[in-house]
Image (spheres, rainbow, N blue to C red):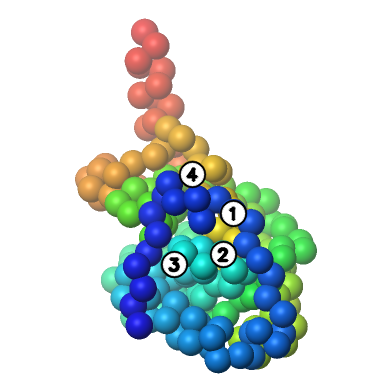
């Protein structure tokens, strides 16, 4: 079942979500929730969806970056973002136990803040400990765009949204992103915004 996606301003997006027990995870209610979240994420479409985004204050998120969604992305952009297909999986009670590789910056959007994007710094590599949909312990080591997705969804489970981390001067509507920034590198965007800031001070 496709569920409505909660938009920014709803208090559920700002709560630290409840952990699930292995028995809960293996129960029918959570299995159905996972199926509904997957269908909702794919319909949106998005590469990740956390339970608070559908009004459930629970430590669970679904992730999938389909190969078909990458076919129209320029190869140089895929390489710059280190973006590769990620098969569907579930993270429950996740915790980032290690971040490395320095920070990288890219534009990021959110299904709970539709129509906007901003440059957000994230760790290039992360190690995540979590439970899967069977309640079994998993360790995920991710880099590049996959690491960004994990950090974005785990933020949701802690009551955070990308706008809490963004470079505020890069915040843009989707239309203006396509018009002004879509084909440019992050370095070019930052340089242009710096020059604009200097010119307005004169």
| Lower position in the chain sequence, tag 4 or tag 1 | 1
Residue assigned mark 1: 15
Of marks 4 and 2, which one's residue comes earlier in the chain? 2
Does residue 196 appear to the left or right of 94 in the view shown?
Answer: left
Q: Which residue is mark 4?
A: 163
Residue 117 position, x and y percent, is: 38, 48
The mark nearer the N terminus, 3 or 4, is 3
What is the CA distance from the residue labelled 3 to the residue labelled 4? 19 Å
Real-space Cα separation, disc 4 to disc 2, in angstroms: 20 Å
Q: Which mark is residue 54?
A: 3
Disc 2 and disc 1 in contact, CB within 8 angstroms = yes
Q: How crowded is the residue under tag 3: few (<14 C-alpha within 10 Å), some, or many (20+)?
A: many
Residue at (55, 91) in percent of width and height: 28
Q: Is residue 44 above or below residue 1?
A: above
For mark 1, does the 10 Å Cα neighbourhood hold few (<14), some (14 to 19), or many (20 or more) residues? some
Label 1: state its secondary structure: loop
Of labels 3 and 4, the one closer to you: 3
Q: Nearer the viewer, mark 4 or mark 1?
A: 1
Label 4 to label 1, Cα distance in Å? 16 Å
How far, Cα to Cα, is label 1 from label 3?
A: 13 Å
- Which quadrant is home to the C terminus? top left
Residue 60, how many percent across, how many down?
59, 72
Dot 4 lies on which element? helix
As displayed, is residue 16 above or below residue 58?
above
Q: Residue at x 51, y 67 (%)?
A: 56
| Earlier sequence position, callout 2 versus callout 1 | 1
The image quarter in which residue 1 lies:
bottom left
Q: CA distance from mark 2 to mark 3?
A: 9 Å
């Amino acid at each position: 079942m496709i569920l409505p996606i909660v938009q920014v301003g709803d208090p559920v997006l700002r709560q630290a979500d409840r952990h699930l027990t292995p028995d809960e995870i293996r129960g029918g209610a959570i299995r159905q929730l996972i199926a509904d979240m997957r269908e909702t994420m794919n319909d949106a479409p998005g590469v990740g969806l956390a339970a608070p985004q559908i009004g459930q204050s629970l430590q669970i998120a679904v992730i999938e970056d389909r190969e078909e969604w990458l076919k129209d992305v320029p190869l140089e952009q895929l390489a710059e973002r280190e973006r590769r297909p990620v098969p569907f999986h579930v993270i429950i009670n996740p915790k980032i136990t290690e971040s490395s590789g320095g920070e990288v910056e890219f534009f990021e959007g959110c299904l709970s803040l539709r129509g906007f994007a901003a440059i957000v710094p994230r760790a290039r590599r992360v190690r995540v400990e979590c439970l899967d949909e069977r309640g079994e312990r998993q360790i995920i080591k991710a880099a590049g765009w996959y690491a960004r997705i994990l950090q974005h969804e785990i933020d949701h489970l802690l009551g955070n949204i990308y706008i809490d981390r963004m470079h505020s001067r890069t915040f843009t509507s989707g239309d203006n992103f396509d018009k002004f920034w879509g084909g440019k590198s992050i370095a070019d965007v930052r340089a242009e915004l710096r020059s604009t800031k200097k010119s307005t001070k004169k």
